[in-house]
Image: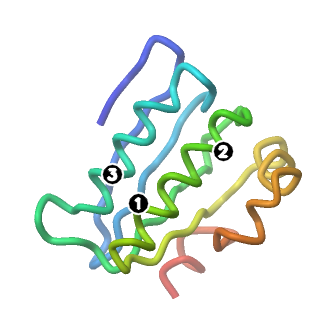
Amino acid sequence: MSDTPETLHITLEMVGQTTFVCLRGRLDFGTTPGFQHALEQAVNGGGTAPTAVIVDCRELTYLSSAGLRGFLVGARAAQDSDVHFGVCALQTAPADVFKAGGFDKIVAIYPDREAALA
């Protein structure tokens, strides 16, 4: 969807009624606005809202506290739209930040796409 100079690449993929927001690179202060915009697009679904939005973090190499805010905004938007929100394939460093911020208590975390779709 977008490619920013701060090295975050975002793509949206539909699998049935689920939208995957796929991240590659760094999610930090500079890239969070683009991430939040992508989440809004995913939740709204271009007029047909999905039943779930899952952020695929398989290629997310860095996550800052500012990036966590993007997840919170996305989770709230999904909740307001009655859309399930989750994260899959968190790598070690981003997972540590996610857990340190307590986000593992408010956002569903799946080991991979298959588990998220189940």
Element assignment for label 3:
helix
Q: Residue at image x 63%, y 27%?
A: 28
Give the mark toward the camera: 1 or 3.
3
Q: Quadrant of residue 27?
A: top right
Residue 73 location, x and y as percent? 50, 52
Which quadrant of the figure contains the N terminus? top left
Mark 2 vs mark 1: which is more N-terminal? 1
Element assignment for label 2:
helix
Mark 2 → mark 3, Cα distance in angstroms: 15 Å
Q: Residue at image x 39%, y 51%?
A: 39
Q: Residue at image x 48%, y 81%?
A: 117
Mark 2 vs mark 3: which is more N-terminal? 3
Residue 107 location, x and y as percent? 65, 68
Q: What amino acid does circle 2 point to?
A: Leu
- Residue 20 is tagged as 1
Q: Quadrant of residue 59?
A: top right
Residue beneath label 2, please?
A: 68
Q: Residue at image x 32%, y 71%?
A: 15
Residue beneath label 3, please?
A: 40
- In-image side of 22 versus 28 (left or right): left
- From what the image shows, is residue 20 above or below residue 27? below
Give the mark toward the camera: 2 or 1.
2
- In-image side of 118 versus 52 (left or right): right
Mark 2 → mark 1, Cα distance in angstroms: 18 Å
- From what the image shows, is residue 52 above or below residue 96? below
The answer to whether the residue labelled 2 contacts the one labelled 1, judged by CB atoms less than 8 Å apart, is: no
